[in-house]
Amino acid sequence: MKISAKLLLTFASLALVAAPSAATAANNQEVSVGGLVFMPQAPLFGTGEGGVASYRFWCSPDWAATAVLGATHVGVKHAGASGSFDLFPIGADLTYNVIDLAPFRLNANLGLRYEFVQSKASILNIADKEVDMSLDDVVLGQLGLDADCAIAKHWAIFAAVGYQQDFNKNKLQTPDGTLRETEDLSGFNVTLGLRANF
């Protein structure tokens, strides 16, 4: 049992916990769907809401590859600005099983996302004219934990928490020029949903 590796992937509150593997040969695929709340760090954005879907394949009892896609609607809360941004992330995670104490399970995830950004936001310029704002697509790093609890033979409810780091730090643009030299989509997200295994 790789206890030392497991301890490195848990938070301090779980540092003394080690557990056996999560997957069995007959049950190594999972599909999850959930609702998501996104809490950006940048003051331009309000709290976002959306959904996420994922497919996970357990390559071994401890390790899995997870494909993820989602959609999030984020409002603008900056003075003089209005509208929203729609975010469409797609990417993959490397997943490691930390705890498996049936019916409870905890996994750690590390991954990358490419996020398509669609702007429906505008702001008043110095002439009090409303102009459109735009932000380029971004590349994100994602770190998080997800926990599930089985409610039937092939079904579980799950919760996930994570932090995403924007690697681009793009300029926020308007037709009049650059509004802000650095703007990013880093922040925390929380997901609740349903998971099926087969």
Image: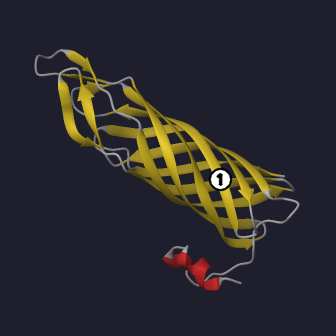
Instruction: Residue 16 in the image: state x and y as whole percent.
Output: 59, 84
Residue at 64% from the left image edge and 84% from the top image edge: 3
Residue at 63% from the left image edge and 62% from the top image edge: 95
- Say which quarter of the image contains residue 110: bottom right
Residue at 33% from the left image edge and 24% from the top image edge: 121
Give amino acid for label 1: Thr
Q: Nearer the viewer, residue 188 or 27?
A: 27
Side of 53 where 40 appears, left or right: left
Vertical position of residue 132 compared to residue 160: above or below: above
Side of 49 where 32 appears, left or right: right
Instruction: Residue 86 in the image: state x and y as whole percent.
Output: 45, 30
- Say which quarter of the image contains residue 146: bottom right
Q: Which residue is mark 1?
A: 66
Residue at 21% from the left image edge and 26% from the top image edge: 80
Q: Nearer the viewer, residue 107 or 89?
A: 89
Q: Looking at the image, can residue 9 be seen? A: yes
Question: Helix or strand or loop: what does disc 1 sit on?
Answer: strand
Image quarter where the N terminus lies is bottom right
- Say which quarter of the image contains residue 103: bottom right
Q: Nearer the viewer, residue 138 or 192?
A: 138
